[in-house]
Image (cartoon, rainbow, N blue to C red):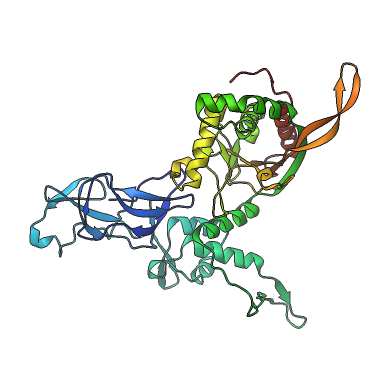
């Protein structure tokens, strides 16, 4: 049994819990363990029925996709190797004592030689070290919390954050910099709360995004009166006919998808000095969980879906997110993200970009305001439903003109919404 591929951008997973013990019987498609990726926690089923003969990776280990994690003895007295082929037959007295698979040449990462000492680093850690221009000597000083003191992704990212946050003090008598981190002690009345795994992951991603992308935000106030009236007029009939709630979110997603078609250079990512323009428009939507954390499921090919299709996708993904039923693929492949800060009563926000995307749109609260309304008989004052759209974008590749025109176009589609539209 190998670590399965759990999404196009997921290259490794952390083993959280083994749901079966050595010697336990396993049915085909029965969950054997729980794995955490940088996107979601999920249970991994077995492709074969049999006996769990050997566990090759412990809880807490980080295992690359395709690497072996267990040996399963199938019912005909054979075991399955990591490549899925059967091995030799095993006699009953060998089942408990003889190793089924020799994985010594499979699980060892490539060594990085530092002086006279060999220390092992995963390809991911070495890639981060290369991007951050860490010398071999500096990398060797990072304490590892992984198996056999291996440096994990968390270790190297934590070291980089500490290095960025530590102030440099120059002594008058000495030109050598001395780094001294300032730690504020807690009083006896303070409560110390350990971050859970998701909060740590969110913290790492937010810091990484701010480090990678210079953020700029453009704001537009949109008149969404037509959208609000149309939705109020149709929501009861839609609920009776489709069994789903008609919310405003699918309408906002539709407007964003249309604006991306008009400005495709918003739908890109950056790879070094290359820009990758995405063929598919996959819109991520931030969903608040009962724990207070946010998760971002993705609506694939949003521009090809009808308003009914978008509504069903939005409702299904939101429900699965709150019930912890999302799969890794539900969170993968996003090319642009929206975040409804208005649901918290906020007028506007400056959201942080989801890497490797280059833009994210915050939707503010809808507020009734007096406004000038143009009519064929002259201007008048009317009560209108207004909301702020806040577009944060990566200023490396999205200039202010493009970022501003894009969010203005989203507002235009909302303001020109056809109130005679049927659904």
Does residue 102 show up? no
Residue in the foreground of this view, choosing between 363 and 210? 363
Tell me how many marks there are.
0
Q: Quadrant of the C terminus?
A: top right
Left or right, 13 with respect to 211, comes to: left
Q: Quadrant of residue 98?
A: bottom left
Left or right of 272 in this view: 34: left
Query: Measured along the vertical axis of the image, is residue 5 above or below residue 164?
Result: above
How far from the left and from the top, in percent, is residue 127? 50, 55
**Left or right: 375 as drawn, with respect to 99:** right
Q: Which residue sits furthest right?
A: 378
Residue at x 64%, y 55% (from the top left corner): 211
Q: Which residue is more in the foreground, 23 or 312?
A: 312
Tell me if residue 376 comes above or below residue 299 in the rendering.
above
Q: Is residue 228 visible in this depiction of the protein?
A: yes
Give percent across and percent down for residue 398.
69, 39
Whole-percent x, y for residue 182 in the image? 67, 75
Residue located 66% across and 70% down the image: 166
The residue drawn where x is 64% and y is 18% is 421
Q: Is residue 369 found left or right of 292 in the rendered image?
A: right
Give the quadrant of residue 15: bottom left
Q: Which of the 4 image quarters holds residue 306? A: top right
Q: Position of residue 67 (x, y in %)?
A: 33, 53
Question: Closest to the observer: 394 or 386?
Answer: 386
């Amino acid at each position: 049994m190998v670590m399965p591929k759990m999404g196009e951008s997921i290259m490794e997973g952390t083993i959280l819990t083994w749901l079966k013990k050595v010697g336990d019987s396993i049915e085909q498609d029965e969950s054997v363990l729980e794995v955490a990726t940088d996107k979601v926690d999920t249970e991994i089923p077995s492709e074969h029925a049999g006996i769990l003969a050997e566990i090759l990776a412990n809880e807490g280990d980080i295992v690359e996709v395709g690497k072996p994690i267990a040996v399963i003895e199938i019912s005909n007295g054979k075991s399955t190797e990591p490549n899925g082929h059967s091995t030799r037959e095993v006699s009953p007295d060998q089942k408990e004592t003889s190793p089924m698979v020799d994985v010594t040449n499979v699980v060892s990462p490539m060594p990085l030689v530092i002086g006279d000492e060999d220390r092992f680093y995963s390809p991911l850690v070495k890639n981060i070290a290369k991007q951050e221009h860490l010398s071999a000597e500096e990398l060797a000083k990072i304490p590892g919390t992984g198996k056999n003191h291996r440096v994990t992704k968390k270790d190297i990212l934590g070291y980089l954050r500490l290095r960025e946050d530590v102030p440099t003090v120059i002594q008058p008598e000495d030109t050598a910099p001395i780094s001294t981190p300032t730690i504020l002690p807690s009083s006896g009345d303070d409560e110390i709360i350990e971050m859970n795994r998701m909060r740590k992951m969110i913290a790492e991603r937010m810091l990484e995004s701010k480090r990678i992308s210079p953020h700029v935000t453009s704001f537009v106030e949109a008149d969404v009166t037509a959208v609000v009236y149309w939705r109020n007029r149709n929501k009861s009939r839609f609920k009776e006919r489709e069994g789903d709630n008609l919310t405003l979110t699918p309408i906002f997603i539709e407007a964003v998808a249309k604006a991306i078609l008009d400005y495709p250079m918003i739908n890109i990512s950056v790879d070094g000095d290359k820009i990758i323009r995405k063929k598919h428009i996959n819109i991520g939507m931030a969903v608040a969980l009962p724990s207070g954390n946010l998760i971002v499921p993705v609506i694939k090919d949003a521009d090809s879906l009808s308003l009914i299709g978008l509504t069903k996708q939005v409702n299904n993904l939101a429900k699965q997110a709150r019930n912890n039923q999302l799969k890794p693929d539900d969170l993968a492949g996003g090319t642009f993200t929206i975040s409804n800060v208005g649901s918290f009563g906020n007028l506007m926000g400056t959201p942080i970009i989801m890497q490797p995307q280059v833009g994210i749109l915050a939707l503010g609260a809808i507020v009734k305001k007096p406004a000038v309304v143009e009519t064929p008989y002259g201007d008048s004052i009317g009560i209108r439903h207004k909301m702020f759209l806040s577009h944060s974008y990566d200023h490396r590749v999205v200039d202010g003109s493009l970022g501003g025109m894009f969010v203005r176009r989203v507002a235009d589609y909302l303001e020109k919404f056809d109130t005679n539209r049927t659904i």
